[in-house]
Image: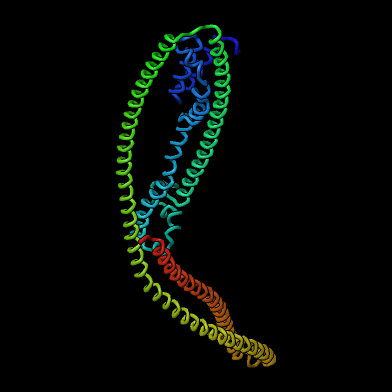
């Protein structure tokens, strides 16, 4: 309450304590004003001046608002975020550093994998030779980077929200401080104004008051100079520590850049080895393709000959079947003749038995010929399928040759100079 002197004094003391960290000089002025309201030796000096100009509420509130108070949670979140920023780069280069030797070892031991794209082998764990399993695949590295980037985004959003809330809270406290300062100064003004009515003064008292005020100002100025010297010393020490930290960071950064340059050189050397291997495989692959084409032409010619032979064999079988039917008819007629000519039965019977044996042989030969035709047809169909497979193999080999050239050009384009 404005008419309660003790309440005004306590409020001024509490306000001085509150702003001591952000504005030490303002806190000193508030404590001296509290002493003046209590009836101190400088009460007349305070009463004869404008308290609002001496205290300067706006300056105290602004310093209180912008004071550098770091919230421990915000500092922890920002530190974690700054660390996580470098983790995707670390895991990506770690994956590349492990993938290149694994690819070189696999291609050296199994040259057949040299035609397989590098990214496909990486995703497959280089044919299961990776010791870290899923982490050594391209998808594993991408998943880890995605998770880390998501964590960075979440930490950034959380840090921004906490910083905004902290700033809003500081603004509300600053406005509350402004109101409290205005209220306390109003009470102090009332009590110091009534001092002229209740307490007479003379020249000696005023002179003593001025001397005491001057001594107080000198003492306060001396304390302020000492405080500023201590702050300057602390600032110099902090700058020295920051400079040492920067030198350490510079050394680490130079070492990291050297490692990156070494990795790039290794990648370039691996690219050159890969290009050499691919170039050495292009000529044999093209020669193999030409041989496959020649084999395909020869196979087609052989198939045509077998087809013509099968058709001719079919005609022979049909002719033999016709002969068999005619012979069977002849034998039937001969049997009738034998029955009619019993006198010649012995000779004709012997002849008939021989003819029957011949018919059986012809029938057996007919069955063999029919089976041969079926086998030829089956072999012809199998040969057709083989020719189709050979044709598809030649097409695939041509596609692999084109893909190897394209992979070589892409890898050469992606490697930094």
Residue 105 vs 310, above or below: the answer is above
Does residue 349 appear in this view? no
- Asked whether 299 or 164 is in front, the reply is 164
Locate residue 212, reporting x and y percent.
Answer: 39, 13
Residue 172 vs 158, above or below: the answer is above
Question: Which residue corresponds to the image point at 43% horizontal and 61% vertical from the top-left?
Answer: 117
| Quadrant placement of the N terminus | top right
Locate residue 83, reporting x and y percent.
Answer: 42, 39
Apparent side of residue 168 relative to residue 138 in the rendered image (left or right): right
Q: Quadrant of residue 365?
A: bottom right
Question: Which residue corresponds to the image point at 46% horizontal and 10% vertical from the top-left?
Answer: 40
Q: Residue furthest front?
A: 203
Locate residue 218, reporting x and y percent.
Answer: 36, 19
Name the image colouring. rainbow
- Asked whether 223 or 298 is in front, the reply is 223
- Asked whether 58 or 402 is in front, the reply is 58
Question: Which residue corresponds to the image point at 58% horizontal and 80% vertical from the top-left?
Answer: 370
Marks counted in the figure total 0
| Quadrant placement of the C terminus | bottom left
Locate residue 130, reporting x and y percent.
Answer: 39, 50
- Asked whether 15 or 283 is in front, the reply is 15
Residue 238 vs 401, above or below: the answer is above
Question: Which residue corresponds to the image point at 53% horizontal and 23% vertical from the top-left?
Answer: 52
Residue 239 vs 322, above or below: the answer is above
Does residue 140 appear in this view? yes
């Amino acid at each position: 309450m404005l008419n309660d002197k003790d309440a005004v004094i306590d409020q001024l003391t509490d306000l001085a304590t509150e702003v001591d960290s952000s504005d030490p000089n303002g806190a000193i002025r508030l404590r001296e004003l509290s002493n003046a309201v209590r009836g101190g030796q400088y009460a007349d000096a305070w009463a004869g001046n404008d308290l609002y100009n001496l205290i300067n509420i706006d300056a105290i509130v602004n310093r209180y608002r912008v004071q550098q108070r770091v919230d421990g949670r915000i500092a922890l979140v920002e530190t974690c975020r700054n660390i996580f920023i470098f983790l995707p780069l670390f895991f990506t280069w770690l994956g590349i550093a492990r993938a290149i030797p694994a690819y070189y070892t696999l291609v050296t031991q199994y040259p057949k994998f040299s035609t397989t794209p590098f990214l496909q082998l990486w995703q497959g764990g280089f044919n299961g030779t990776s010791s870290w399993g899923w982490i050594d695949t391209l998808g594993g590295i991408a998943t880890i980077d995605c998770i880390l980037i998501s964590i960075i985004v979440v930490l950034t959003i959380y840090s921004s929200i906490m910083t905004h809330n902290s700033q809003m809270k500081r603004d509300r406290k600053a406005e509350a401080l402004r109101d409290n300062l205005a209220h306390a100064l109003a009470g102090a003004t009332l009590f110091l104004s009534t001092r002229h009515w209740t307490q007479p003064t003379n020249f000696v008292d005023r002179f003593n008051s001025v001397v005491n005020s001057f001594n107080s100002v000198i003492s306060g100025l001396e304390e302020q100079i000492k405080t500023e010297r201590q702050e300057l010393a602390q600032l110099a020490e902090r700058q020295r520590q920051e400079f040492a930290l920067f030198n350490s960071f510079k050394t680490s950064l130079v070492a990291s850049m050297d490692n990156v340059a070494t990795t790039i050189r290794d990648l370039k050397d691996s690219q050159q080895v890969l290009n050499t291997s691919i170039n050495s495989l292009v000529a044999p692959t093209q020669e193999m393709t030409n041989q496959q084409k020649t084999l395909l032409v020869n196979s087609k010619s052989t198939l045509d000959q077998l087809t013509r032979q099968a058709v001719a064999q079919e005609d022979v079988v049909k002719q033999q079947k016709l002969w068999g039917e005619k012979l069977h008819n002849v034998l039937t007629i001969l049997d009738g003749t034998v029955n009619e000519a019993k006198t010649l039965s012995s000779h004709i019977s012997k002849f008939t038995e021989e003819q029957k044996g011949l018919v059986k042989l012809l029938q057996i030969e007919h069955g063999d010929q029919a089976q041969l035709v079926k086998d030829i047809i089956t072999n012809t169909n199998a040969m057709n399928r083989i020719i189709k497979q050979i044709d598809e193999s030649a097409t695939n080999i041509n596609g692999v040759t084109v893909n190897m050239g394209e992979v070589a050009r892409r890898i050469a384009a992606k490697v930094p100079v």
